[in-house]
Amino acid sequence: MSFFGFGGRPQLSSEQKIAQAEAEIDMVSDMYSRLLATCSKKCIDNTYREADLNKGESVCLDRCVAKFFEVNVKVSEKMQGEAQNKQGGGMFGV
């Protein structure tokens, strides 16, 4: 560990940065695909009577997307909390 926290994290190489960016793009693309499949299946009728979404479908999609992101945030917070608990509970190990 470095003195006063300077230089504690090693710099990532450009290959590592590219790999991180690619992993993040894959994760976001996967989340978008799951959101689209889930909310479309739930909110849009398969008969496609009209070219545009009707009001009910629009409201359903809006609520579905909002709930999807709300759950995603809650799950992320829970997982981060559990990861911190496994690492010793904080900066000073309290």
Image: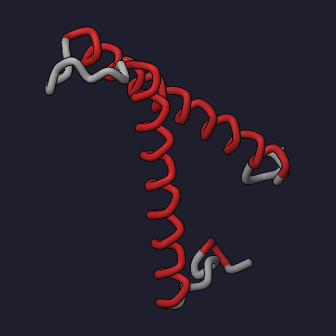
Percent from the top left, x then y, of residue 84? 75, 47
Q: Locate residue 56: give its quadrant.
A: top left
Nearest the camera: 75 or 64?
64
Residue 85 lies, with reference to residue 55, above or below; the image says below
In the image, 29: left or right of 91?
left
Q: Quadrant of the C terminus?
A: top right
Q: Residue furthest left?
A: 51
Residue 12 lies, with reference to residue 94, above or below; the image says below
Q: Residue furthest top?
A: 56
Percent from the top left, x then y, of residue 33? 45, 46
Nearest the camera: 2 or 45?
45
Percent from the top left, x then y, of residue 29? 44, 55
Residue 51 lies, with reference to residue 72, above or below; the image says above
Q: Quadrant of the N terminus?
A: bottom right
Q: According to the image, what is the colour scheme of the structure?
A: secondary structure
Task: Look at 45% across and 20% down and name the residue there.
Answer: 42
In the image, 84: left or right of 33?
right
